Amino acid sequence: AQSVTQLGSHVSVSEGALVLLRCNYSSSVPPYLFWYVQYPNQGLQLLLKYTSAATLVKGINGFEAEFKKSETSFHLTKPSAHMSDAAEYFCAVRPWAGSYQLTFGKGTKLSVIP
Amino acid sequence: GAVVSQHPSRVICKSGTSVKIECRSLDFQATTMFWYRQFPKKSLMLMATSNEGSKATYEQGVEKDKFLINHASLTLSTLTVTSAHPEDSSFYICSARGTDAAPEQFFGPGTRLTVL
């Protein structure tokens, strides 16, 4: 069974500072990995995805994530936080074959301090 | 592309009534749609997986007779909360799967259900 662990339910950064949101997965084989963002009272928007094409994945809004198989990690980063980045971020995993279901982490709320 | 809509975005109903929520894929055909429930400050809980033309597959603990799911076409799935009670109040989100070449799910904007 797959699982996703997001370290830190709440992360605060200053505007302009580095954003680092951590995600570790548990899977017998490298899966598909995703980062989604959710703004209040809205659905989820895909930030980026890992599909084995490249270990460093660039997404929207300046975010990127690096897949590290040895560490079973897929941490999300952004060099400089913006106020508009304040939201809830979810890491999710899906197996290569078989089920299309996503398994979500518990989410990390990002606050950006002016 | 890959837009999923939900209707209504917000609904308030009386206890004992039924509420239908629609989920539509606007610019692609969705063979599979998913229904999630999200409690305040919590992650998404998968309720059921819906495949076009067949019965939905419900997750353990989800009452299939209470949460009726219909996926009549490749662009529309509906969730009906029957005999709603205050504990059914929640944020319901649907998603749709694209093709195998695009493994991600595309999410609707969610429906806030409040049962009085």
Image (cartoon, coloured by chain):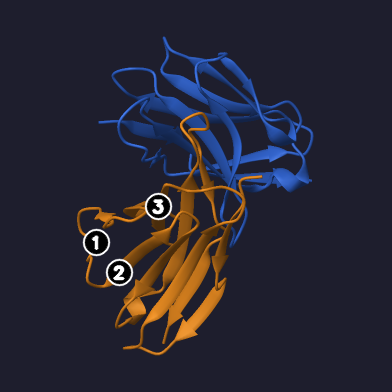
Going 37% across and 73% down the picture, which residue do you hit?
Answer: B80
The crowding category of the residue bearing disc 1, from other C-alpha atoms within 10 Å (few below 14, some 14 to 19, many at least 20), is few
Residue at the image position 43 percent from the left and 69 percent from the top: B90
Q: Quadrant of residue A65?
A: top right
Q: CA distance from mark 1 to mark 3?
A: 13 Å
Which structural element holds mark 1? loop
Relative placement, left or right, of A37 versus A14 is: left
Q: Is residue A2 above or below residue B113?
A: above
> Quadrant of residue A75 in the image?
top right
- Please give the residue where the numbered disc 1 appears in the rendered image: B62
Marker disc for residue B67: 2
Q: Secondary structure at mark 2?
A: strand
Q: Which chain is orange?
A: B
Residue type at mark 1 is Val
The residue positioned farthest toward the top in the image shown: A70
Residue B54, horizontal then vertical, whole percent? 28, 55
Q: What residue do we see at 40% from left, 74% from top?
A: B89
Q: Which residue is mark 3?
A: B34
